[in-house]
Image (cartoon, rainbow, N blue to C red):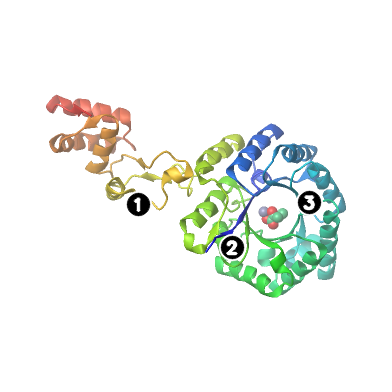
Amino acid sequence: MSKDKVQIFDTTLRDGEQVPGCKLDTREKLVIAERLDVLGVDVIEAGFPISSPGDFTSVNEIAKLVKNATVCGLTRSVKKDIEVAAEALKIAVKPRIHTGIGTSESHIKYKFNISKEEVIERAKKAVAYARNFVGDVEFFAEDAGRTDNAFLAKVCEEVIKAGATVLNIPDTTGYCLPEEYGAKIKYLKDHVKGIDDVTISCHCHNDLGLATANSIAGVMNGARQIECTVNGIGERAGNTALEEVVMILKQHPYLNLQTDINAKLLYDTSLMVREKMGMLVQPNKAIVGANAFAHSSGIHQDGVIKNRETYEIIDPADVGVTESAIVLTARSGRAALAYRAKKIGYDLTKVQLDSAYKTFLQFADRQKEVIDQDIHLIMKEVSKISKIAIA
Ligand code: KIV
Ligand code: ZN
């Protein structure tokens, strides 16, 4: 059975760029956009054109540069926003306007203080207006995660009639549980007239650490687009991480879902985004963190050296990481020391290894990690007792 495609909508340059402390100039955004296009994302959300002249220029320049992906600009459900986004995007090969409005009780009551009918009216008008400029209009129902399903379905049905091509169902506050978010997508699939003619999109925030799980629950229930950022950066605790959803779909083929992402470029792309945005990545971050393929306990190291798959579900080469790392600490065993020593030229006999291991433990207890330079020193010590062969 052929796999269904899940579109990857990258919002690193819009939601990702909203991170405190991050500021990219147009030149840096162009470099990232070009890389995202090569990586194989389907949509690049390039910015929020009305928000500043700088953002307008960035969206416009990205629209000129990008040849494969759809280039998208965000707007509120406000005429002027839509006109400015249309202007910024008009040169794009594949332009998309992303417009919407909050649909939850708290947005309607406190943010807008309008009736539910008025929310639907504004949503319909925004979508219909955007359709005058582009054929591809995505509608977002902000805070859909906390919106009553029946009302959400009504809004969705009306915006489909008004011409929306994509329905974005954001869990803006990262509140939903995966089961709940998946059930929301299923509810829309079952209750909204015309839903099969549009693409449902998941846009999940990570306030409870569930953004990726929720996005996967979404596609398992019929959504076919995931909105995500490189390294999971974004407002507050961030957005769904692009590299995570790509590898989940790849590592679980029975889901019958696939993306067009060239996974071998994931690690390099992660490094590029960290460097350009000045945003560090936690060492234990899945797929792209410094420790994602590092093994430091003796039991794990022994298993990985015998067969990588004992403790790794992804081949590091598949995401562009050169190789798994065997980190030498006081918790490492003889197998790890022999492995690392061999890599830098020492082929140890059993007797030599026993002797080297004793010295190694002294080093390891003194310092957090034993590096190659230390191994040379250890071998020097040991060679005084027994001659060590250089492989
Ligand atoms: O999180 C959110 O709801 C958003 C929308 C503007 C799409 O970022
Ligand atoms: Zn968001």
Q: Amino acid at mark 2?
A: Val
Whether residue 180 is situated above or below residue 39 in the rendered picture = below
Q: Residues within 10 Å of mark 3 (few under 14, many from 20)?
A: many
Residue farthest to the front, as pictured: 1
Q: CA distance from mark 1 to mark 2?
A: 27 Å
Q: Which residue is mark 2?
A: 219
Residue 124 is situated, as x and y percent measured from the top left of the image, at 83, 63
Count of marks, rendered view: 3
Q: Which residue is mark 1?
A: 309
Q: Secondary structure at mark 2?
A: helix
Q: Which residue is mark 3?
A: 75
Quadrant of the rendering where the C terminus is positioned: top left
Q: CA distance from mark 1 to mark 3?
A: 46 Å
Q: Is residue 109 visible?
A: no
Q: Secondary structure at mark 1?
A: helix
Residue 2 is situated, as x and y percent measured from the top left of the image, at 54, 61
Q: Residue at x 46, y 56 (%)?
A: 251
Q: Secondary structure at mark 3?
A: loop
Which corner quadrant of the figure contains ligand 2? Answer: bottom right
* Circle nearer the N terminus (3, 2): 3
Residue 381 is situated, as x and y percent measured from the top left of the image, at 19, 27
Q: Amino acid at mark 1?
A: Glu
